[in-house]
Amino acid sequence: MTFKNIIDRRRVLLGLAAASTAAAAPAGAESKLAETPDLVNLGDALPDVTARFIDARDKRAANETVAAKVWPRAPEEILLCAQGSLPERDIAGRGLPRPWGKRGIERVRDYVPPSVILTMIEGHKAKISHILGTKSNRGLKGEQMWLGRMEAALPLSEQYCAQIERIRSASGYSAAYVAETRARETLKTHVNSIMNFEPRTMEGVVIQAQAVMAWQSVDAFLRHMDVDAWDWPAKMAASVLAQGGSA
């Protein structure tokens, strides 16, 4: 740490102390600067915008929890990696791993939906018909075996897919997810509007700090994926330093 760093830090702290004192002065007291009214209005509205997002987030999470208790696992008979097969997922779209192989390694398996099984059944029937028209009948047993497996798997796949659709529809999860997404976008737009200001006073800096904290109510993964929000902490830091240097 250099002597210059210490001096600069002391200067900023003295400036912030002076700015904070000015911001805390009674309403009737003289002030060289007043905060931008639009920024103050955005700050006043922030708690309500944040509360609406948290409410939508919690409702979606509650729906997800209820659905998870009755969400079925795909039958072993329909677990197959084939063209058109789908990974087994929960109601939120997260993969559902299960032990696989001799070592029991956890991995997400694919299952075959009814439409794919029907296509496979028709394919095996066509191959059997072709083989029966040859002299050797080579591959007949294998095709007959797979035809039998797919015909047995079809009703299981139909039951499984119908069950997850019933649960998805009854849970209201899709509507709750859309509501949360809209509320999160509203919060993001509101916070972004706040962070685009250059505060004139410590009051504005506090509003920006509150906005950054409000954004923390969003899931960490979603915050990380939202590149527009990456520079908000840096903007707030710049606002703090600007106040410290303006005293």
Image: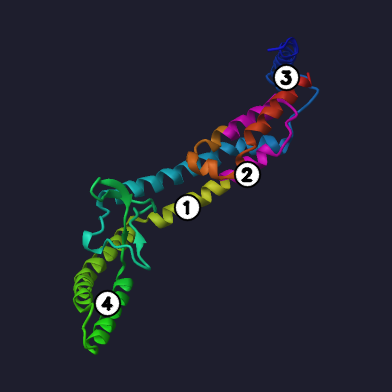
Q: Residue furthest top?
A: 3
Q: Earlier in the sequence, mark 1 or mark 3?
A: 3
**Callout 3: helix, strand or loop?**
helix
Decide if residue 78 is on the left or right side of residue 237. Answer: left
Rendered image: mark on residue 228? 2
Q: Earlier in the sequence, mark 2 or mark 1?
A: 1
Q: Would you say the residues marked 2 and 1 are in contact, meaning their CB atoms lie under 8 Å apart?
A: no
Q: Nearer the viewer, mark 4 or mark 2?
A: 4
How far across and down, in percent of the image, does residue 111 sit? 30, 62
Q: Residues within 10 Å of mark 2 (few under 14, many from 20)?
A: few
Q: Which residue is mark 1?
A: 179
Residue at horizontal 54 percent and vertical 35 percent from the top: 214
**Callout 4: helix, strand or loop?**
helix
Rendered image: mark on residue 121? 4
Q: Nearer the viewer, mark 3 or mark 4?
A: 4
Q: Which residue is mark 3?
A: 19
* Magenta-colored span: 187-212
**Callout 2: helix, strand or loop?**
helix
Task: Report which quarter residue 188 is drawn in.
Answer: top right
Q: Amino acid at mark 1?
A: Ala
Q: Earlier in the sequence, mark 2 or mark 3?
A: 3
Query: Mark 2 to mark 3: distance in Å?
Result: 29 Å
Q: Amino acid at mark 2?
A: Asp
Can residue 190 be seen in this snapshot? Answer: no
Query: Mark 2 to mark 1: distance in Å?
Result: 21 Å
| Main secondary structure along the magenta-highlighted residues | helix
